[in-house]
Image (cartoon, rainbow, N blue to C red):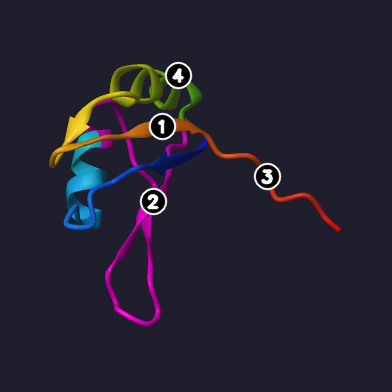
């Protein structure tokens, strides 16, 4: 299950996000979206967890959590619609 993680502090690293989600199960991959101009985080990213139960537990427990001074938002990522 692909999860969208929003409102991350610009200082939060991919490794930190992955570690947070690994508390609830297997993380297949984690990808923070980076600003091409500055090289810094844009404050959101995606996490892929192969087991739906683990992904739901992570969503329930991490949504609204304070991470590095920011209250993060976690939800199931919506598939991009074809135009």
Mark 2 and mark 3: span between their CA atoms?
A: 16 Å
Q: Is residue 53 above or below residue 42?
A: above
> Disc 3 designates what residue?
79
Report helix, strand or loop for mark 2: strand
Rate crowding at label 2 as few (under 14), some (14 to 19) or many (20 or more) other CA atoms within 10 Å. many
What span is in magenta?
Answer: 21-50
Q: Quadrant of residue 32?
A: bottom left
Whether residue 30 is visible, yes or no, is no
Tell me how many marks there are.
4
SS class, disc 1: strand
Q: Is residue 16 magenta?
A: no
Numbered circle sitting on residue 74:
1
Q: In the rendered view, would you say 52 is above or below 72?
A: above
Distance from the alpha carbon under mark 2 to that under mark 4:
23 Å
In the image, what residue occupies the spot 20% across and 56% down? 13
Q: Secondary structure at mark 3?
A: loop
Which of the numbered marks, if any, corresponds to residue 44? 2
Q: Is residue 57 visible?
A: yes
Labels 1 and 2 touching (C-beta < 8 A): no
Snapshot quadrant of residue 25 = top left
Q: Earlier in the sequence, mark 2 or mark 3?
A: 2
């Amino acid at each position: 299950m692909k999860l969208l993680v929003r409102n991350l502090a610009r200082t939060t690293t991919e490794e930190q996000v992955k570690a947070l989600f690994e508390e609830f199960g297997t993380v297949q991959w984690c990808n923070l979206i980076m600003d091409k101009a500055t090289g810094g985080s844009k404050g959101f990213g995606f996490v892929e967890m192969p087991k739906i139960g683990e992904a739901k537990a992570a969503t329930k427990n991490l949504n609204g959590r304070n991470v590095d001074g920011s209250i993060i938002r976690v939800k199931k990522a919506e598939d991009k619609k074809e135009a």
